[in-house]
Amino acid sequence: MSELNGIEQTETDPEILINAFLKDFSEIYDEKDKKRISDAWNYLIGKTLNLKRNCGKPYYLHPLRVARVLAEKHLGADTIVAGLFHNILDVDNDCLPDIEKHFGKEIASICNGTAKITSLKIKSKTMQQADSIRKMLFAMIDDIRVILVKLADRLDRMRNLKFVSLESQKLIAKEVIDIWCPLASRLGMADIKCEMEDLSLKYSNPDAFQQIKTIVAQKKQERADYLNNAVKKIYTATEKAGITVSISSRAKHFYSIYQKMRKRNKDAGELYDLLALRIICNTNAECYTLIGIVHGLWKPMEGRFKDYIAMPKANGYQSLHTTVICEGKPLEIQIRTQEMHNIAEHGVASHWLYKKGTNRDMVKAEDLSIINQLRALRDEDLSNESFFRELKTELLGDSIYVFTPMGDVKELPKGANAIDFAYSIHSSIGEKIIGAKADSKIIPLVQPLQNTQIIEILTNPQAHPTQAQLNSVKTSRARSRINAWLTANDPTYIDKEAQEKRDAEILANTIYSKKVAEEKRKKSREKKKESQYSGKIRVDDLTNFFVTVAKCCSPVPGDPIVGYISRSRGITVHRADCLTFLRIPDIEKRKVSVEWDTSEKKVNEKEEKLKEQELEKLRQKQKEKNQYKKQR
């Protein structure tokens, strides 16, 4: 774990802090860059000097630690400035124009991107989580430095997780292990990934963490002696071969040991392949010579040799891996050039290494399969929750690499089959697939593919997607394409997820409609028994609408009613408890308030009253006349 400069652990004076930072990285940044970083720091201090975090420490310490993580990666001054500003919008959400004016459009763009991701809530397993992941991943397409800054932010927060509640510790640790660690892995940033995994384990399963830590510490000297003996033998052999190498030894990080414990159902003390050596040489040819030397010293374990030089990982990682039996124990050995080592450590971040010329052959964002996958998905219809769950698994989970007959590499999620492979090439091939060959041998379409297989797809113009294929595929692309075809062409196909969603809407509408009906019945009971209706229907206090009474339920005056805007019959009115009404698509958006009209009855009553008054006057006059005649 990379620790802070000693000054920064106790000092809070802004000037002392920035001077210590610039001194520590004086060999990386020139005077122009140092001034740019200092100006950014002063701008940050101007905004946050008197602000404190919940732990009581100054607000600006976290941004400085984030900048330090980025500087340790030897990233350029722009990325350092973006690190200082990564959460400045929390303090002043109107400062982006000012940042763009003083520090440039790129810095403002990165700040805006990191602020959007910070505001995302990636906790619950809901559509909101899926949408948050989508926004986060798509932010990478525009500028991967947004994600580099957020990874540094997550790493520093994990390093300081002891300052939050136990509940928050577990939630943050889960988020990091589910999202940020796989993402760091896909971007080739192994050191950040490993440290975040160890810290996540520390807070999510402290008992296992302490157990592993104790066992590793107990055997420290024994491990050191074992590795030193192996290193001496390799140095002796390489000197005879005339190859200059540097060798470093290490124990596997705690989370890796924890995963092995779970996979093999053993305690850490029962595991032996926890040690590794890394041999750094100068050329690719020397890498292959060294693998021969190592296998000459110790017997290799069967099936444990991997050539990531000839076939690099999707994140750009290259190395030769082998596991040998040394003194009766498994020993993992990695062999790579210095350039490969830089990529293994920094991953895609190496594209922004500060020193000019160092990134000539480094990993570029546009070369990463995850970026190309995201670009391909950007125009897809991404509205289905399960689609996002698959997208997360597909983009952040384990992968396999298979070849087309032309030698092109295709990356697929672990468990993918030939149908997934066909759709990864083109939808038209996936729709017409009838068979597949792996390494020239016919295989079942649903059989999971294996690493490095050469896959050939057999098609027929008369073939088409089926529901069985839909149930067997693993990739979101294949699933969405098959689902779309079946929806459009197969009248017997029922989209179960869409149906479940619709049933949930109907249930919600039923509950709502019952509530409306009950309220209207209550109002109806409160009216006088002699109340009469005009027969008309009022819509928002007006009666001059074209209204159609639904025949399915035939509501009559006095019944609780509901209405909606139909496409050709004006306002259509149903009984409030009508099942047909509940099944109408988008009913919540189309619904209008309706009620039976009683205003005409009131007018009629008034007219009747006036007529009665007139009649009474006439009767009175007639009575007076009659009295007058009698008197005569």
Image: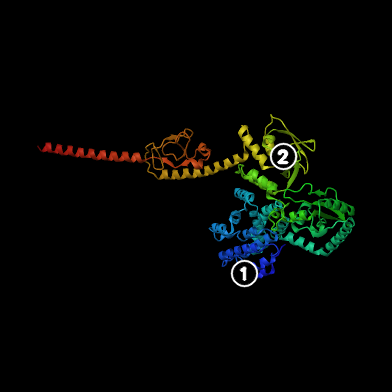
Foreground residue among 258 and 600: 258
- Residue 257 in the image, given as x and y percentages of width and height: 77, 56
- Residue 107 in the image, given as x and y percentages of width and height: 60, 56
- Residue 590 in the image, given as x and y percentages of width and height: 49, 40
Quadrant where the image shows the C terminus: top left
Task: Examine the image and state in which quarter residue 521 appears.
Answer: top left
Real-space Cα separation, disc 1 to disc 2, in angstroms? 57 Å
Residue at x-position 14% and y-position 38%: 627
Foreground residue among 607 and 359: 359
Say whether residue 62 is visible.
no
Q: Pointer 1 and pointer 2: residues touching (CB < 8 Å)?
A: no
Q: Which residue lies under the disc numbered 1?
A: 15
Q: Which residue lies under the disc numbered 2?
A: 421
In the image, which disc is placed on residue 329? none
Task: Examine the image and state in which quarter residue 496 appears.
Answer: top right
Left/right placement of residue 616 relative to residue 601 reads left
Left/right placement of residue 198 relative to residue 91 reads right
Left/right placement of residue 551 relative to residue 267 reads left
Task: Examine the image and state in which quarter residue 41 appears.
Answer: bottom right
- Residue 9 in the image, given as x and y percentages of width and height: 67, 68
Spot the residue most to the left.
632
| Residue type of the residue flagged with mark 2 | Phe
The local secondary structure at tag 2 comes to: helix
Foreground residue among 559 and 264: 264
| Residue type of the residue flagged with mark 1 | Glu
Foreground residue among 551 and 52: 52
Which of the two discs, 1 and 2, sits closer to the camera?
A: 1
